[in-house]
Every structure is written in structure tokens, then in C-alpha cells.
Image: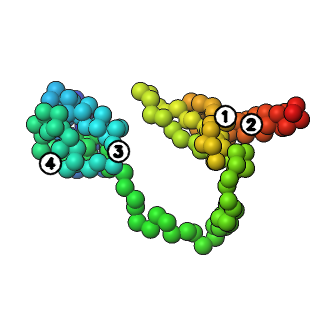
Amino acid sequence: MVQTAHQLPRAQRCELLDIPRSSSYHQPQPVAKEDLLLMQLIDRIHMDKPFLGSRRIVDALVEQGHKADRKHVRRLMRLMGIQAIHPGPKTSKPHPQHKVYPYLLRNLEINRANQVWCSDVTYLPMASGFLYLTVVMDWYSRKVLSWRVSNSLEEVAPIFWTVVLGVISRHINLLFAA
């Protein structure tokens, strides 16, 4: 908003700020309490099921006993900056310069433990931010060999290699101890 107590006329101030003069009269209104409650409910539903759009969020709100229509929910979602997660266009089209790595397990019969390991890094939403879970598993037995939790994404790669090397050294020690 453009200040009103100033020496320059409003038209010149708006010209200097490169905004239309009509928008300088706008007085922002606080969000209503009912809308704040709906926004909290929409946020909970979105965190639980981020693939739901405004129509299905309205259905979930009605199931919980709240009165809401689609246009209102859509406006609040836009105000909150949230939208349903869905695949975008051409998501599986590879870039021509990216190297394609062969799938080494294609014709391999996995029939015993410690033959193939897999790893995954996933995030866990928390009240303020995320935690990152790194896991190494045995593919055959589905046994978790090792896991670590990190509070920053930058620490995930070093933690991942620490986990993998720890699992490998534990298995080497078991081999030589037997």
C-alpha cells in the first residue's frame, strides 16, 4: 500500500513505484476465523493425501461435518499456495544427453539372502520441516540391514555411504569370524 502522508501526490508516487494508481487505494482485509479453520482442515487433508484436488477435499470436509463449496475451497487452496500433486506432461521422456544405465538384475534369479541389497532415501513430514530416512535392505528377505535419520538433505549422501560401508564391514566381519 502507498503511504498517504507524503509530500508527493499519489499519482507521482504510484508512477515511481510502477503500480497502477487504483491499486494504491486497496486496504488488505484480515482472514476470517471461519476461513482460518477451513484452511487448517484443508492443510491437514492435503498433508495426509496430497493428490486430492479441490473437489475431493470438499468431499472430505463434508464427511467431517463442515460446510464448504468447491469455489471457496479452491480460493483458499490458491491463497495457501497448495495444489494437488499429479504427473506433469512428458514426465517419463528422457533427455537425449542423459546416460541410460542398464538394469543389472533383469535376468538374475534372486533366491538367497545377501545376494542383492537395495537402498532408499525418503522424507518424513514433521511439524516444522522434514526428516530424511536412509535405509539399506536385503532384497530377498526384506530385512532392514541399517537405517539412519537426518534433519537436512545435505547430510543424506554422507549418511548413505556411512550406512552402506557399515553394513559391508559388518558382513565382512561375520564372514571372517565364521
Amino acid at pointer 4: Lys
- Locate residue 62, reporting x and y percent: 14, 39
Tell me the residue that label 4 is attached to.
71
The three-letter amino acid code for the residue at tag 3 is Pro
Q: Are marks 3 and 2 in contact (CB under 8 Å)?
A: no
Q: Secondary structure at mark 1?
A: strand
Q: Mark 1 or mark 3, which is nearer to you?
A: 1
Q: Which residue is mark 3?
A: 50
Q: Is residue 66 above or below residue 89?
A: above
Helix, strand or loop at label 3? It is: loop
Spatial CA distance of label 1 from label 3 is 29 Å
Q: CA distance from mark 4 to mark 1?
A: 48 Å
What's the distance in space between the residues labelled 2 and 1, CA to CA? 7 Å
The numbered disc on residue 146 is 1
Horizontal and vertical percent position of residue 176: 89, 35
In contact (CB < 8 Å): disc 1 and disc 3: no
Figure check: 69 above or below 100: above
Residue that mark 2 sits on: 167
Which numbered disc flags the more N-terminal residue, 3 or 4? 3
